[in-house]
Image (cartoon, helix red, strand yellow):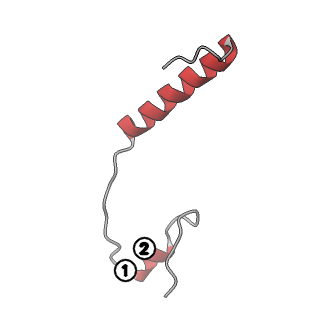
Amino acid sequence: MRWSSLSESEQKIQDANILKFENFFKHNRQSHFILENKKEFDNLNSDILKPIF
C-alpha cells in the first residue's frame, strides 16, 4: 500500500516493514502445546506473562 504523503525514504521503510510483517506470519505459525510438569512451566521464557496461583 502506498501513501502519497510519505517521502521516498519513508515509503521504503514502510514497504520493508510490511514485508517483514507478512514474512513473520508465513514462517511463524501458531502452535499449541501442553505443559507436562512444573519444570516445563518454570522454564518458560520470562518475557511471557505467567499466571499467579
At x 66%, y 11%, the residue is 8
Q: Where does label 1 land, which residue?
A: 37
Distance from label 1 to label 2 (Cα)?
6 Å
Q: Given the image, on which type of amino acid does mark 1 rest?
A: Asn
Rendered location of residue 49, percent (x, y)? 53, 69
Name the residue at 51% across, 74% down: 50
Given residues 5 and 19, the one toward you in this image is 5
Which residue bears the numbered disc 2?
A: 40
Q: Report x, y in % for residue 28.
A: 39, 43
The local crowd at label 2, few if under 14, some if 14 to 19, many if 20 or more residues have their Cα within 10 Å, is few
* Type of amino acid at the residue the image marks with label 2: Glu
Q: Residue at horizontal 48%, vertical 20%?
A: 1
Q: Around disc 1, counting alpha carbons within 10 Å, would you say few (fewer than 14), some (14 to 19), or many (20 or more)? A: few
Tell me the element at label 2.
helix
Residue 43, percent from left and from top:
50, 71
Asked whether the residues under the numbered discs 1 and 2 touch, taking CB atoms below 8 Å apart as contact, a structural biologist would say yes
